[in-house]
Image (cartoon, rainbow, N blue to C red):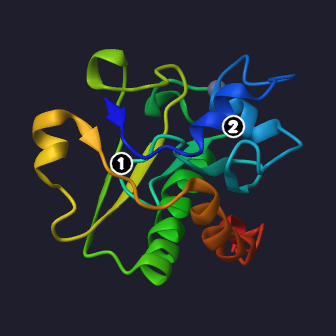
């Protein structure tokens, strides 16, 4: 699948990659000292929230457990709770910031099911607007993404910064 408007890809593709992402993008996001470079909006001991570098729409986020696990049944309750709690927080924040008409929220397990990263499971949350699924998406397998990732990141990161780090224990 191609993305027509991808101004963020050029610096990404041409930038030197010193210490990443040799491994799994979610493990890198969970441990990197440079949260901006990994487009990480929020993380705690249990889960991370990051922008999808190749979004289907503006505000396409991914939520993953910190633990490198491939299947839900491998996760402990704390990880599972963090995942759904942060999915809920992400939906609230995206609703406030982007006022979408709907959402797609879901997970793919295994390459055969469409998972880009098959060995570290993650939740996708994709805001949807009336009319965003135009003929190009259907027929040309091409996505139109009008907002640059950096802009999306700057819009969303203050909202995630407002989340209490210990909200899972509340
Ligand atoms: Zn991982």
Q: Residues within 10 Å of mark 1 (few under 14, many from 20)?
A: many
| Label drawn at residue 39 | none
Residue annotated with mark 2: 11
Query: Is residue 24 depicted above or below 29 in this figure?
Result: above
Query: Is residue 135 depicted above or below 19 in this figure?
Result: below
Between marks 1 and 2, how big is the CA–CA gap? 20 Å
Quadrant where ligand 1 appears: top right
Closer to us: 25 or 56: 56
Closer to us: 9 or 119: 9
For discs 1 and 2, the disc positioned in front in the rendered view:
2
Q: Position of residue 112 (x, y in %)?
A: 28, 16
Q: Residues within 10 Å of mark 2 (few under 14, many from 20)?
A: few
Residue annotated with mark 1: 56
Determine whether label 1 and label 2 are within 8 Å by CB. Answer: no
Give the residue displayed 54% in from the left and 42% down from the top.
Answer: 53
Q: Is residue 108 left or right of residue 72?
A: left
Q: Earlier in the sequence, mark 1 or mark 2?
A: 2
Give the residue displayed 75% in from the left and 72% down from the top.
Answer: 161
Q: Is residue 165 left or right of residue 140?
A: right
């Amino acid at each position: 699948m191609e993305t027509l408007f991808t101004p963020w890809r050029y610096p990404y593709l041409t930038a030197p990659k010193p210490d990443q992402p040799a491994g799994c993008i979610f493990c890198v996001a969970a441990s990197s000292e440079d949260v901006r470079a990994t487009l990480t909006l929020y993380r705690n001991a249990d889960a991370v929230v990051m922008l999808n570098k190749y979004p289907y729409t503006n505000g396409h986020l991914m939520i993953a457990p910190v633990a490198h696990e491939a299947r839900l049944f491998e996760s402990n309750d704390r990880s599972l709770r963090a995942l759904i709690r942060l999915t809920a927080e992400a939906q609230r924040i995206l609703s406030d910031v982007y006022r979408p008409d709907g959402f797609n929220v879901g997970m793919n397990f295994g390459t055969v099911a469409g998972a880009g990263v098959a060995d570290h499971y993650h939740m996708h949350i994709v805001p949807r607007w009336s009319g965003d699924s135009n003929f190009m998406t259907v027929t040309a397998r091409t996505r139109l993404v009008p907002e640059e990732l950096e802009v999306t990141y700057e819009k969303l990161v203050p909202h995630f910064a407002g989340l209490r780090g210990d909200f899972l224990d509340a």
